[in-house]
Amino acid sequence: MKIICLMENTQGGRECLYEHGLSFYVETPKHRLLVDTGASGAFMENALRLGVDLGRVDTVILSHGHYDHAGGIMEFARRNPDAKILMQKLAKEAYYHKNANMERYIGIDPQIAELPQVELLKGDREIDKEISVFTNVTGRKSWPSGNRELKVKKDGEFYQDDFLHEQYLVITENRRRVLMSGCAHNGILNILEKYREIYGEDPDAVFSGFHMRKKSDYTQEDIEMIKETAFQLKKSDSVFYTGHCTGEYPFGLMKEIMGERLVYVHSGDEVCI
């Protein structure tokens, strides 16, 4: 299984474009997948530089309904109108970043849900024996504090986002499983707990942001949560590949605890499982 990061916040060693966004290309025996498409069409330029033929992609998985994961879908759909696009129905709702000083729409382009190749899912789905998605993570252990400013707007009122629009991709190949999540808004520990309920063991590898990045200073509570998450992840049997919304400072704290079990993935990086 080959996984190439087509877009992430930082530039890797292959001189790719980078932006606040996330996109992965995944090559399996049966599929050519896109998991998210970054904040713009820039991931397509990176694909060209890396020799990835997006015309061969058969399925796009949208991890959740935020612009920095869906910004390139419309441009991709014009390039490859035959690829299926799978997203949760709730991902088309109106999502905002809102606090006392600002209110900003961070949802996806409403036109995406109207594309003929889009399938709006309502919960878990086994696509075939190789790929499936699961949802409905309700645990709140080490729930990222940044979530408190993320809202959904309904009938003119703002409500706390419960992130039921998140979906998590599981890829199975030769008895090995890879779990892919966009930002793990529901908390990576809670997502792993749900995964274990379904599969009875840890995945071999996890690709996910951890949504720990902050623009303001980290409180002692934040630091303790980051370290506790790292200690818990270290107990698992998985190797974790992260970036994007994890943040460089949290990554450094976690790396000290997890060592080789935690890897930062930049734009252009390739991982073989």
Image: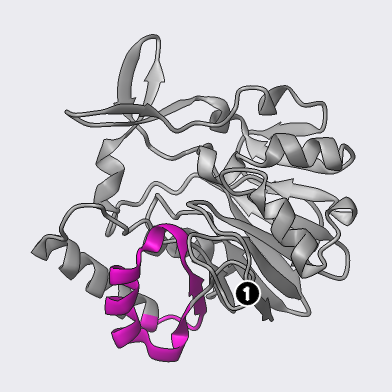
Q: Quadrant of the N terminus?
A: bottom right
* Amino acid at the residue labelled 1: Asp
Left or right: 180, with 104 as reference point = right
Find the magenta span and give its range: 234-263
Is 125 located above or below residue 149 in the figure? below
Residue closer to the observer: 122 or 168 = 168
Residue ID at (24%, 50%): 145
Magenta-colored stretch includes residue 260: yes
Q: Is residue 7 visible?
A: yes
For residue 235, above or below residue 196? below
Would you say 154 lies left or right of 146 here? right
Of residues 183 and 243, the one nearer the viewer is 243
| Neighbours of disc 1 within 10 Å: few (<14), some (14-19), many (20+) | many
Query: Can you tell which quarter of the image residue 12 is in?
Result: bottom right
- The answer to whether residue 103 is left or right of residue 56 is left
Say which element carries label 1: loop
| Residue furthest front in the image | 15
Along the line of sight, which residue is nearer the eye, 188 or 92? 92
Inspect the magenta stretch and tell me whether residue 236 lies in it: yes
- x and y percent of residue 266 in the render? 54, 70
Residue denoted by label 1: 269
Q: Residue furthest bottom?
A: 260
Image position, residue 179 (x, y; %): 59, 65
Q: Quadrant of the C terminus?
A: bottom right
Magenta stretch, main secondary structure class: helix
Foreground: 14 or 173? 14
Q: Residue at x 67, y 44 (%)?
A: 41
